[in-house]
Image: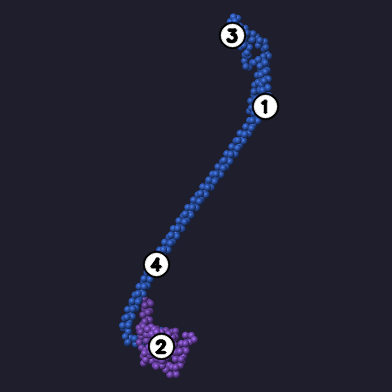
Chain colours: A blue, B purple
Amino acid sequence: MRIRRILCAGLLVVGGVVAVAPAAYASSPKDHGKELYECVEKAVEEHPEALKGDAEGFENALDDCKKAKSLLTPALPEIIWGGLAFLIVLVVLMKFAFPALKKGLKDRTEKIQGDLDAASRAREDAEAEAAQYRSQIGDARSEASTIIEDARADAERIRREVVERAEAEAADVKARAAEDVRLAQERAMSDLRSQVADISIGLAEKVVERNLDRATQEALVESFIDSVGNGPR
Amino acid sequence: MTGGDKVEAYAQAILTIARAEGVVGAVEDDLFRFARTLQGSDALRNALTDPSLPAERRVAVVEELTGGKALNLSTAVLGMLVGAGRVNDLGDVADRVVALAAAERERDVAEVRSAIELTDDQIRRLAESLGRATGKTVDVKVVVDPSVLGGLVAQIGDTVIDGTVRTRLDQMKAQL
């Protein structure tokens, strides 16, 4: 579009120049010859040495007189041939160069658009992938946190169990020791009581034997007979 | 024949002979006392069961122990049992003879252990007292046993009436 606009503007400028130039020449051809005559006359006056054989300055002045006075007012043949050449070149360009150029631009545009789309897709993919990575990192962090918490909980549970087991074993050992002490005390007391009883009974037996004379024995027998006869023992 | 049958046979035979001689009470008393003496003396039991001693020597030991203290029939019966090698059954035979004799008199036997010898009057009164206590008519067989220290203990069948000093001391010991 842009190129087409430039081309249209160029054609309008060329058309304007072509339209104005013939009008300028057509309006005063005689003026144009008069100016050439006046220019030649002025060159002769300014270069009198040409009559003496040194015509170089005079020839230069003539050449200047032959040249166009302005770019906007060229000679008609130049305008015609220039316009034709321009049209030929324009046609050739429009026929061969512009389509190729247009196709190239289109291909380049499509390629750039494709690259842009691909870049956009790549960026979106990258962003999605980055989001996925962030999500995975978040999941991994969460999982790691969970694992760490679980490990801490397990460690705490194991520590608590070990402590409880150790305390229970210690309490058991203490209780067994206390029970052993108690049993030992009871055994000692029982042995002591038994020994005291044996000694006491032994002494009592000796005392009784010493005091059990015939009369006492008879009294015991009579007492037994009387007590049995008076009722069941 | 089992051991129990042999004891019963010996007891019946001894009782038959004593009954024929009219000395059942004396024979059963002699057998009972000798059996209790044998029961309380390991040395006597070992001597009478010593296989190295001839039977004649063992019978002579019995005769020496009972001579003058027991009826000749009782000494002969004991010598027969020792000579026949029935020393270990002698206690059972004596108990069975006493039981059979008491059964013939329709009486129960009260085995009484005392630290001293009892007089006949004490034995009679004791029999009366035990009869009142048990509701039975009893014959008293006294065994002198110094280990009771003092007092008496009477056993009538499964009933035991204990009034010995030994038992009271044992009770005190148990309480201590």
Instruction: Please identify the quarter of the rendering in which residue A54 is found.
Output: top right
**Distance from the alpha carbon under mark 4 to that under mark 1:** 120 Å
Labelled pair 4, 1 in contact (Cβ < 8 Å): no
Q: Residue A180 bears which disc, if any?
A: 4
Regarding residue A227, the answer to whether it shows in the image is no
- Which amino acid type is marked by label 2? Ala
Q: Which residue is mark 3?
A: A57
Q: Is residue A109 left or right of residue B40?
A: right
Mark 3 nearby-residue class (10 Å; few <14, some 14–19, many ≥20): some
Report the residue at 60% width, 35% height from top.
A115
The answer to whether dots 2 and 1 both sit on one chain is: no
State whether discs 4 and 3 lie on one chain.
Answer: yes
Give the residue pinned by disc 2.
B55
Q: Which chain letter matches label 3?
A: A
Select label 3 or label 2 by which is in front. Answer: 2
Q: Are marks 3 and 1 in contact (CB under 8 Å)?
A: no
Number of other residues with Cα within 10 Å of mark 4, as a class: few under 14, some 14 to 19, many 20 or more: few
Q: What is the secondary structure assignment of the residue under circle 2?
A: helix
Q: Quadrant of residue B129?
A: bottom left
Query: How far is disc 4 from disc 3 in space, using C-alphas?
Result: 150 Å
**Total marks in image:** 4
* Res B14 visible: yes
